[in-house]
Amino acid sequence: MSVNLTCSAVSFDPSVKQHVSDPSQDRGALQETFQQIDAHSCPRSYNFHMHTTASDGRLSPEALMQQAVDIGLQGLAITDHHSVRGYQIARHWLDRRAQDPRHLAGESADLPQLWSGIEINAGILDIEVHILGYGFDPEHERIQPYLKGYPVRGKDYEAKQVIRAIQTAGGLAVLAHPARYRRRSPSQLIPEVARLGIDGIETYYAYDNPDPWRPSSKQTAQVKRLAQQYDLLQTCGTDTHGPNLLMRL
């Protein structure tokens, strides 16, 4: 099945250099992956929302990556709050594992694709939301204010600025768990972030933390409809903070 890589929802800045030589920053491949995500993708094929000890998670980056391999994930992103330290450690772990003689000889499990990731607090419509960034260059100057381990304030706190920073750094911006915010509904938030140029929405999310993990049906239906209406990419993630990638807590 061919995949259309010209989704109009994605804001491509021709002045941004694409780091296609670095798979963790390959925005085109990431966009293609997001276009194939459905309700069954997470948590055993893809997972784009996970936290490590680099922010408020219980798993070390190394332990998270080992679980990812054991589960058989094809692709993932570590989205620590205001930090890329977990991603950087995980990437180093993955690079070392790729050079292991057993892997080179085809005697070990396949390794997943790791993309750069982050979760950033932002203000919009008088509330605070979380915006996920994927496939960006962590060294880009525009993303640096958001890598200090704590939320920014002032102009950089505005959702418009967060979205633009992620995109200027070469990445895709996604609104996290849009049905989780108490004072604003998805029907209010999604049109507004679409107006601001966001690339996608976290459609498949388990709001009630079920075991086994599954996306919440009512919220998923609403968010999916709005994402399609505004021509936005759709992602999935467990939002893992605990010791098991197959659960949130």
Image (cartoon, rainbow, N blue to C red):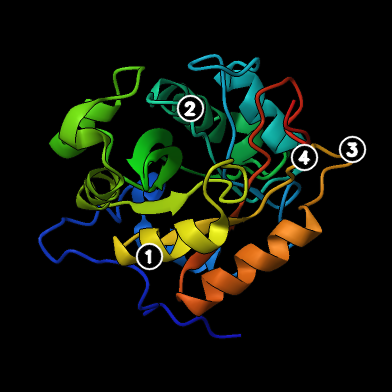
Residue 137 appears left or right of 51: left
Residue 143 x/y as whole percent: 23, 36
Viewer-proximal residue, 95 or 11?
11
Query: Which residue of the protein is positioned furthest toward the bottom in this rendering?
Result: 2
Residue 198 appears left or right of 177: left
Q: Residues within 10 Å of mark 2 (few under 14, many from 20)?
A: many
Q: Tell me the distance, in whole angstroms, between the alpha carbons under discs 4 and 2.
A: 20 Å
Give the vertical position of 162 relative to 60 (above or below): below
Q: Tell me the distance, in whole angstroms, between the alpha carbons under discs 2 and 3.
A: 23 Å
Q: Tell me the distance, in whole angstroms, between the alpha carbons under discs 3 and 1.
A: 32 Å
Query: Which residue of the protein is positioned furthest toward the right in this rendering?
Result: 211
Q: Which mark is residue 194?
A: 1
Residue 159 appears left or right of 236: left
First along the sequence among labels 4 and 1 = 4
Is residue 184 at least partly visible in the picture? yes
Which numbered mark, 1 or 2, is in the foreground of this view?
1
Location of the N terminus by quadrant is bottom right
Please tell me whether mark 2 sits on a helix, a strand or a loop: loop
| Residue at (41, 77) in percent of width and height | 5
- Residue under label 2: 80
Q: Tell me the distance, in whole angstroms, between the alpha carbons under discs 1 and 2.
A: 24 Å
| Residue at (62, 43) in percent of width and height | 180
Residue 80 x/y as whole percent: 48, 27
First along the sequence among labels 3 and 1 = 1
Q: Tell me the distance, in whole angstroms, between the alpha carbons under discs 3 and 4.
A: 16 Å
- Residue under label 4: 71
Viewer-proximal residue, 112 or 10?
10
Residue type for callout 4? Ile
Which numbered mark, 3 or 4, is in the foreground of this view?
3
Give the vertical position of 227 relative to 64 (above or below): below
First along the sequence among labels 1 and 2 = 2
- Residue under label 3: 211
